[in-house]
Image (cartoon, grey):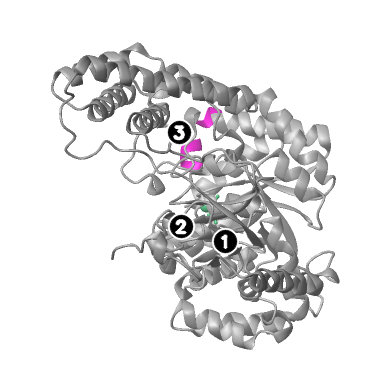
Amino acid sequence: MAEPSSATLSGARVGIGVSPGTAFGPVVQVAPPVRPPAGEPAAADPEAALVRIKAAFEGVAQDLTARAATADDTAQQILTATALIARDKGLIKAATKHLSAGKGPAAAVDAAVEDYAAQFTALGGYFAERVTDLRDVGSRALARLLGVPAPGIPPFSVPSVVVAEDLAPAETATLDRSLVVAIVTQAGGRTSHTAILAAQMGIPAVVQLPGATRIAPGTPIAVDGDTGEVTLNPTAQYVEDLVVRRRRRTAALVGSHGPGVTRDGHPVALLANIGGVEDAVQAAALDVEGVGLFRTEFVFLSSERAPTVAEQAEIYRQVLTPFGRRRVVVRTLDAGADKPLAFANLGPEENPALGRRGLRLSAERPDLLDSQLEALAIAARDTGADVRVMAPMVATAEEAAWFSRRVKENGLPKSGVMIEVPGAALRAEHVLAEVDFASLGTNDLAQYTMAADRMQGELSDLLDPWQPAVLDVIALACRGAAVTGTPIGVCGEAGGDPLLALVLVGLGVSSLSMAPSKVGIVRFALSLHSLPECQRLASLARDARTARDALDVVRAEARTGLTEIL
Ligand code: PEP
Ligand code: MG
């Protein structure tokens, strides 16, 4: 179906709200990568074309160097290294060759970049990791050559709503929190890592918004990250209503604080998901009982080389210290799939989500796991923190035993596993017998149960954790945990949905970990419902035929004190 043009885009449209909160501001469109025009004729004057190509690459190098001058350390290194690629003489030589072979200037640049990309890929390792940067340089040079906007986020200085087809996790992580009031994407899904990062950063976000990339830059829009509603050119009244709705919800939550507990006194620990030192400092200042998931791979997304034990220990100390005696569950590197780490690359795979990611990578690179465990043990000793270490992507009891042994050998007291592979949930009784605790990764569990790529936003309906099949798999894992007496929590995005949180507690989980921005409403939801009520909601949800029915029945049966502010 053809997309509407920006002229026809108006009023309200609905995507999927993935990070709560409301915001209002002008649109900044993230420009897509630039491609050469189809059927571009050969350069009439190859000499003159070459001069323009050289100027385009030099312009890109100068832009990158200027941006490096004001960037932080890590970004500075990346930008400076990328500027060097733009000045590589080999690129100009390759472009000259393609011009002489009869290509137009844009096609010659594109072909030169692709020649280089093939060489980089063949060299492997560090060079293969630079292919994305190389293509970015090529795309920027093309933009200059064709006189169109450069790809990526244009510079802006007014608080704005960033709108894109999609954002890579690294792009999201480097957004300026003080200038980005909301994020809206046309693609993406509820558990894509960009959505997770947005919630982590406390930036309201909506994904899967039809026609998002056609909204004209500068258009004022209102974003509701709870309902997924996005309104173009809202009236002053609408913006005011949004503020009022927000205020009503905030007012309902003010009286709710302290440890998570159901109405009849059943404790459910409310924990924060974090991705680094900054998150840790912010979350520790909030009313949370600790950390239920520290995604350590997020710290190293732009690291070129493996961090040393000393470097890691320093980072972990900074993460642990703010939490004092509160628990901090640290997940070992979950590299692979959409979170590739330059220093943990085992080469291309046909299906990375089903490949050597998570603990499977640790099996092939035990050096990385050992250095991480050693660093964690040092940080735990230095800070006296309550550190618990868990492995991602565990599928079997042998893997759980192998991991647990290594954790204990490093002097760390508690080992756990994520239950995010259906096979591990089915055999939870055996898998959990090997460890001290478990945490349900509902994002991947939904992906693997429903065979639906979590990166593919169009499959959001299948990835919905309300899918009764997903609830059944969670119930199985909880039953296994009950047999072994192993505490089991949830750290996937499902834990931050207040209605689903009730169902999860009814199924038997004893902790819920989520983006800190979601803790308040979940605490409030629990405080209104007793454990038997949660159990009843869980059984109603599992009896439902569809995900929609499951949500509807729980919404209808939950207490109105909650549903009227959702
Ligand atoms: C999950 O899969 O639910 C999870 C918490 O891990 P991640 O989202 O980092 O894959
Ligand atoms: Mg996962």
Q: Which of 123 and 393 is in front in this view?
A: 123
Q: Nearer the viewer, residue 502 or 361?
A: 502
* Residue 301 left/right relative to 6: right
Q: Which of marks 3 and 1 is nearer the N terminus?
A: 1
Q: How crowded is mark 1: few (under 14 residues within 10 Å), some or many (20 or more)?
A: many
Q: Which residue lies furthest to the left in this view?
A: 102
Q: Which residue is drawn at 41% across and 56% down?
A: 214
* Residue 253 left/right relative to 221: right
Amino acid type of disc 1?
A: Ile
The image shows residue 38 at horizontal and vertical percentages of: 20, 40
**Ligand 1 has an atom within 8 Å of the beta carbon of the residue at disc 2:** no
SS of the residue at dot 1?
Answer: strand
Q: Which residue is drawn at 57% across and 26% down?
A: 67
Q: How crowded is mark 2: few (under 14 residues within 10 Å), some or many (20 or more)?
A: many
Which residue is labeled 3 in the image? 364
Which residue is labeled 1 in the image? 221
The magenta-colored residue range is 359-367
Q: Do the residues labelled 2 and 1 touch (CB within 8 Å)?
A: yes
Q: Nearer the viewer, residue 432 or 301?
A: 301
Asked if residue 366 lies in the magenta stretch, the reply is: yes
